Image (spheres, grey):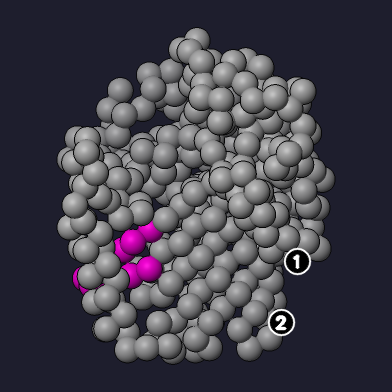
Amino acid sequence: MKVSKAQLNQLIQNKIHAAGLSQDHAAIVADVLAHADARGIHSHGAVRVEYYAERISKGGINNHPNFTFTPTGPCSAVFDGDNGAGHVAAKMSMDHAIEMAKSAGVAVVGVRRIGHSGALSYFVQQAAHAGMIGISLCQSDPMVVPYGGAEVYYGTNPIAFAAPAEGEDIVTFDMATTVQAWGKVLDARSRNVPIPDTWAVDKEGKNTTDPFAVSGLLPIAGPKGYGLMMMVDILSGVLLGLPFGKHVSSMYHDLSKGRELGQLHIVLNPAYFTDEAVFRKNISQVMQELNAITPAPGVKQVCYPGQNSRNRELLSEKNGIDIVDEIYQYLISSDIYQRSYDNKSPFAS
């Protein structure tokens, strides 16, 4: 089923609002999810709506949070999300960070006690649209084994970055610190095909090609990815006095309770470090020079990081966004949710 971004946005907004979130907050959640689907990041788009709707309806997302923004220094602050929708708290806290960086040159804003916030690319692009460099990182469910381990400890702990180029161009990079996302394992299960042995391990800590045997994901680049996910967890969890590592709450455990997640935004104002116009010009030059590099055999073109997602976004503006029929039927139905995610194992189908 193909729908326009505007249609998808409205369908998601309707469902989230029907579940209990205010119209204003539902609109922000819908905007973040539609952004992900438009860029081809379907694991963070409309597929999540039913889960969010169930958690909202059961009280696990605060429908009327008391957000507070507390400056703690000339260029630092803490935003308390009161376990409201993570998308809303992350967007509003990034707005504060951008304003702080305009006057201070740098802003570091910790975001405390929020729910899942979706694709981080959305929030770093907020900064880039304002002429700033945006960096964001956050915690997630314990699903990853530390390098050399057989038990999960950290989450996929993503990192995102965006910087403005000339005109409306933006370079954006958004990645998990695991070799592959959990959604790719679910896709392999649905098609009953094996997975590469570099993606995950079984309950004994052995690399597996069986998607049904997965009990832990693997960090990217072995010990390097392991170190990165530890860094993300410290900066978005330990630093903010929140649960960390294996103590981070599962997305599916008790949907009636808040998740107490953490996120960290870092915003840099290029004008405080160099000539802003030269900075934008050089970012554009980097993008162009990467595209001009001689491609390896079998490769059509070298892309700069995030370019494929941007190309999918542009294509979706012309042709619409592909949404699974089952998800579309749920979105147009009157049901708040049709299946329950409550108290499911994070490794369940």
Q: Quadrant of residue 264?
A: bottom right
Viewer-closest of 114 and 140: 140
Viewer-closest of 23 and 254: 254
Residues packed near mark 1 inside 10 Å, few (<14), some (14 to 19) or many (20 plus)? few
Give the residue at x 51% y 74%.
267
What amino acid is labelled 2 in the image? Thr
Q: Which residue is mark 2?
A: 72
Q: Is residue 208 among the parts visible in the rendering?
A: yes
**What element does badge 1 sit on?**
helix
Q: Residue 108 appears at what percent x and percent y? A: 60, 75
What amino acid is labelled 1 in the image? Leu
Left or right side of 127 for 255: right
Q: Which residues are magenta?
A: 163-172
- Observer-side mark, 1 or 2, equals 1
**What element does badge 2 sit on?**
strand
Does 170 appear in magenta? Answer: yes
Q: Residue 280 appears at what percent x and percent y? A: 28, 76
For marks 1 and 2, give the CA distance. 13 Å
Name the quadrant of the N terminus: top left
